[in-house]
Amino acid sequence: MKDRREFLIKLGIGCGAAAVCTQAGASLRSLVPNVSYDPPTTVKLGAPNDFPQGMKFLPDERLFIFREGFTFHAVSAVCTHLGCTVRAEALSQPETKTVGGQPLKLTHQFSCPCHGSRYHGDGTNYAGPAPRPLAWYRLSIASDDGQLVADLAEPVDHTFRLTIA
Amino acid sequence: MANEEEIVPTEAPGVHKRRFWSFRPQSDRQAGDAIVANFILHWFPAKALKDSLSWNYSMWLGTISTALLGLLIVSGLPLMFLHIPSVERAYASVKDIEYVVTFGSWLRSVHRLSAHLMVAAVFLHLVRVFLTGAYKNGVGRGQRREWNWVIGVGMLLVTLFLSFTGYLLPWDQLAYWAITVGTNIASSVPVIGERVRELLLGGRVIDQPTLIRFYALHIVVLPGLLGVLFAYHMWRIRKDGGLARADRVAAQKRTEVPTVKTKTYTLLGIARGTSPNLRAYSVEPSDVSVNSIPDLTRRICIVMMGTIAVIAALAAVVRSPLEEPANPLVTPNPAKAPWYFLWLQELVTDTTIKIGGFTINGAFVGGVLLPGLLVGVLVLWPWLDKSPASATGTWLPRSRRRQNAVFLIICALVLVLTFIGTFCRGPYWHLFWPWQPWPQLPTRI
């Protein structure tokens, strides 16, 4: 008799707790978004020939586009430490460095205003708390209108170059 | 009809005959009744120890924190009617509060100054409790003061999170980049980090879902949580036998005079019959204790009204800053958190660790591991502290000298880092002397 009473009390408490937890879980789950309204990660940047020789900063995409002749590459402006936008400083003397087996003319270096991370022109971190080099993103040419396209969801290694004919 | 008229109400227990309660009791009995029958004061003891009321012992920092919390709620209400939690309109609405609304800038300043001072007051309260060993159990059997310490650490964290969510609401540059840095610290946690960030932001980028989430947290969730914790915190103080100071008084009294068997103070208020029906030790003989009304309530009034006066006057002089509207395209240089988070900003700057080819982001070490460790040690400290019970409720006792020193050194380190972050960091987070001018840099690229 006593066992049954205790069992039923525990069963009641257990059921109540399970019900409350499930409903709390459901409420929390509702806060995890199912649909993303984020801006697309593949963005058209404009006609390649509109880009100047050297560097152009695109604030909306937080991206540096480098052009040397007809060769392009894109370096992210998002600091790898805590995500602030790094600023470019022009070097007084451009220097050439072998990056990914190919020579690359470095015209700038980058500094982060939030915690003082510093990067070489190819995105390699050399001072401050940044744990990784800046990301490089894949560039391509849009098949419909020939614009330069950056894929912000696809980091590439530092050998990547886009050369247009 | 005639029968009904004959019924005369008799004296009944539990019926309070006046509409309100007495603030000017004429006897001990009335004084006890004035506490117990008082809707606002019933959670106070009817009698308070003189030593517990001392200015020097507690410095009334908890009461100051409570007064500031009250001010925050009261000043937050009108601001709630004026602020529009939308990314398009939040900045303009705060600008209106600052420049258009009559007394708006004063209200905002009251809210902001109270928030800043509350962080300081709650922190100092924690320091006081540590240095007086007030989380320790003294002479009373069944005391659980350590749990109230844990609740208190929780309330400090809620206070910090409240202020964090609060300074996001104007949606200016400070807000935008604080969310960027804050949520990236969350995402530096291995495995779950990215999902935590997404849950906080309501997406993968900072936008309207982010603002409304932090708004709901700031307006409802966190104040509610703080209210519940506050109520439990106060209840526990009573149930642990009052301030830790009381244990000292009790310990001294027991050695000096034989214990007097008498009724407990709570029964003074409750027992309305002819005689009290329970006997217990009293730690509040009349030579060390006073009636809570008026002695306790007078001091509470002085502290609370003093706090209100100071804030109200300061708010008339100190204006609240408002940075440029949130601009995802430009990170301010330097981008600084509010002063009480600058020690954390220093930590995440200085703690990126390289072991061989392996790098651990300072965001994780300085933003998660170290603060987590600090909070963990704080929470566990009452169980690690092996000092004698006699070190309870007294400032800087000899037996706790070493741990007090270590605690003060950690506090000093936090303050030094805060100082460096506030006064010695300039553009690109370079070190400057406080008096050294910063180089002029272009604000835009």
Image: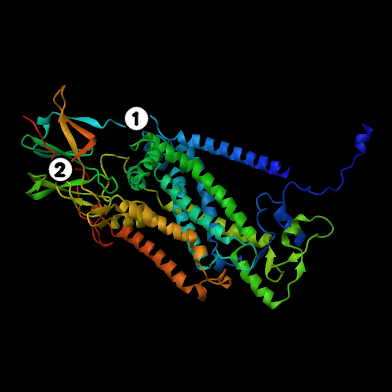
Say whether residue B422 is visible: yes
Chain containing the residue with disc 1:
A
Residue B349 percent across, percent down from the top left: 29, 55
Residue A35 percent across, percent down from the top left: 37, 29
Residue pictured at 59% horizontal, 67% vertical: B54
Residue pictured at 47% horizontal, 74% vertical: B401
The numbered disc on residue A123 is: none
Protein image colouring: rainbow
Residue B21 percent across, percent down from the top left: 72, 51
- Nearer-the-camera pick, B367 or B181: B367
Label 2 vs 1, first from the N-terminus: 1
Left or right: B384, with A45 as reference point: right
Disc 1 marks a residue whose amino acid type is: Tyr
Which residue is disc 2 drawn over? A158
The numbered disc on residue A37 is: 1
Kindly give the residue lying farthest to the right in the view shown.
B2
Residue pictured at 55% horizontal, 63% vertical: B135
Q: How packed is label 1: few (under 14 Cα within 10 Å), some, or many (20 or more)? A: few
**Callout 2: helix, strand or loop?**
loop
Disc 2 marks a residue whose amino acid type is: His
**Callout 1: helix, strand or loop?**
loop
